Image (spheres, rainbow, N blue to C red):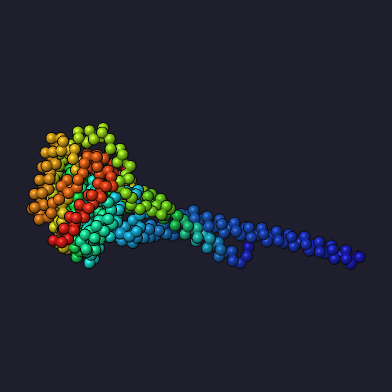
Amino acid sequence: MNEKDPDQVKWAYRLGVLAQGLILGGLLALALMNLMVEIGDVRIFRYQNF
Amino acid sequence: MRGAGILLIEFGVDFCSNKQGVKMVERQERASQMLVLRSFFRGATQPNFASAVIMLGVLLFGVLVYIAVVNDKLLAGDSYRYFMDHNLDTQTYATHQILGVEAGEEPSVLIFGSSVMIRCIKDRDTVADLVTTKSDQSVVAYDLLTDAQTMWEFEAMVDRIPDGGSGVLVLGASFGMWTYTLEDLEELIDAPKLGLPTPTIDAAAREAGIDIPFRTHIYGLDASSFFLARRRTFLKNLLSGGISYGDPLTAWWMKNVNDPEFWEEEKARLPEQVAEVEENLDRHLATVARAIEDLRSKGDYEVILFEAPINPDWFELDTGRSFFTGLRQDMMSFAEAENIQFASALDLVDLTADDFVDFEGHISNDEARMACTEAVSDLVVEALER
């Protein structure tokens, strides 16, 4: 193992934390959006069932 | 010879030991990479406070971006095409049009109405060209026609017209527009059709005792139903480049209603619709009166209450004849009381039953539509000259 490794390991861990936050944040936003769709019963008006 | 042999052996030993050294370095590097990768996965999978903070940050950022992007300028511009559900999505198109109304120097021609009136007006450019040519003054026309438009939506759109403008407003009223009940108003609150906050509809609903969702006075949040309903449409249109507004005479359902069996159903439904009009007419006239008052407070506007095309075959039936004659009388009395002009397509355009696909009053062909467009344009010209 070279001298840079401890730093690399630390940064890799931080990157993992960041990725986790970003992915979960995106999923949470999607989940909330779908929850609002379900609760609000949102739909597009279609004339003559267009 | 012996010296050369020794050199070869030494070279061989060096070569082998170098090879082993390279392998060792490679192994060390692989181990180091695995350690970094394991560390990444540990950070990505283990619960930790920092990730939770980032997650909430992403959510907050997303909401802020949504609020910043989804405002009254979004649909006013060309990006409305990304929210068009199909090429005759009149609600999105009318939202685009009303948000684009400007109180400029040129008078505006604002045309409202339902699907019947949609097929009486060729398009906004044709109206603008006809009026500009005949009146010798440049105008900007706005197509604010929507399928199944209610007077509550008409009032909501008038509410969005900016102060300081001038021009002519044409309300092309088909008989269906007077039939809507309080259940329809409740439906408008539950599933808004227009892509903008509608405080006047909220006020009408509140007055009728209908519960209103919490309003934030933030455009994107208060109109979120419209945008949420179009989330898949938006993604699809992003890939395809958006949808432009089409020709209303190409609506696929027109061939379905152009059928004698359907016409019989329409005739059979008339007594029910007559009862609905009798029950709801006063409420709708009051809504129109409010909208006119609001418009007059905004600028110098002339208002025309235009009776949208009626299939002449209605007058072959006793119920039809008495209903449409009575309704016209009510509209004329209202126009007189409000000091606005009343005009009827029946009087101005020579339409036969063959020009309609159904009894509701949808015009079937471009020739009849153009005659109707010219009649409306002539009325606008007269109003501009007053």
Q: Residue B351's spot in the image, x, y percent?
A: 21, 44
Q: Looking at this view, is B131 or B45 the one in front? A: B131
* Residue B79 visible from this viewpoint: yes
Q: Residue at x 28, y 45 (%)?
A: B365
Q: Residue furthest right?
A: B1
Tell me: B144 left or right of B294: right
Report the label total. 0
Q: Looking at this view, is A2 or A26 the one in front? A: A26
**What is the quadrant of residue B200 in the picture?**
bottom left
Q: Residue at x 22, y 53 (%)?
A: B374
The N terminus of chain A sits in image quarter: bottom right
* Residue B209 visible from this viewpoint: no
Q: Residue at x 80, y 62 (%)?
A: B13
Q: Looking at this view, is B378 or B343 the one in front? A: B378
Q: Residue A41's spot in the image, x, y percent?
A: 30, 45
The C terminus of chain A sits in image quarter: top left
Q: Looking at this view, is B71 or B141 the one in front? A: B141
Tell me: B262 left or right of B10: left
Q: Residue B51's spot in the image, x, y percent?
A: 44, 58
Q: Residue B286's spot in the image, x, y percent?
A: 12, 51
Q: Residue at x 33, y 50 (%)?
A: B246
Tell me: B348 left or right of A28: left
